[in-house]
Image (spheres, rainbow, N blue to C red):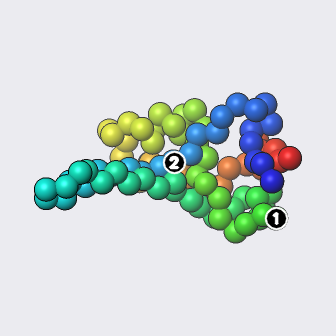
Amino acid sequence: MQISAPDGEPLAVAGLWEVWQPRDAEPVYSYTMVTCDASPWMRRVHDRMPAVLDAEGQEAWLDAATPVAEALDRLRPYAGELLASE
C-alpha cells in the first residue's frame, strides 16, 4: 500500500538527526522519523503514523528558535482527508 498526498506532492515529516564522533573513527550519522498516534483514517493500517507537517508546521519544526512546547504540539495525527492510498 502506498500512502501519499491526494495531489501527489511530497509529504513532509518530522525527523531528528545526530552526528556522533567516536574517538579515532569516522563520524556516525543517525536519524529517525518521529511518529504519533494514527489518525482515524490511518488506523485501518497501523496504530502509529509519521508526524506529517503542513507548511506552517515545517517552518516551526525547522526553526531552532521555536519553543519546544510549540514544536511538540506539531506532532499530531494528520487529517485523513489529506491522505490517499493505492
Whichever of labels 1 and 2 marks the residue nearer the N terminus, that label is: 2
Residue assigned mark 1 = 44
Nearest the eye: 24 or 79: 24
On residue 14, the disc is 2
- Quick one: which residue is furthest to the right in this view? 86
Q: Work out whether 76 lies above or below 65.
A: below
Residue 68 appearing in the image: no
Residue 48 appearing in the image: yes
Tell me residue 9's x, y (percent).
70, 31
- Per the image, label 1 sits on a secondary structure element best described as helix
Q: Residue at x 30, y 54 (%)?
A: 28
Residue 72 in the figure: left or right of residue 38: left
Q: Residue at x 54, y 34 (%)?
A: 56
Nearest the eye: 86 or 35: 86
Q: Residues within 10 Å of mark 1 (few under 14, many from 20)?
A: few
Tell me residue 74's x, y (percent).
53, 49
Tell me residue 86's x, y (percent).
86, 47
Q: Amino acid at mark 2?
A: Ala
Q: Work out whether 5 lies above or below 3.
A: above
Residue 66 in the figure: left or right of residue 32: left
Tell me residue 49's x, y (percent).
65, 59
Q: Amino acid at mark 1?
A: Arg
- Quick one: which residue is furthest to the bottom in this view? 47
Nearest the eye: 49 or 73: 49
Q: CA distance from mark 1 to mark 2?
A: 22 Å
- Per the image, label 2 sits on a secondary structure element best described as loop
Q: Residue at x 38, y 54 (%)?
A: 30
Q: Residues within 10 Å of mark 2 (few under 14, many from 20)?
A: many
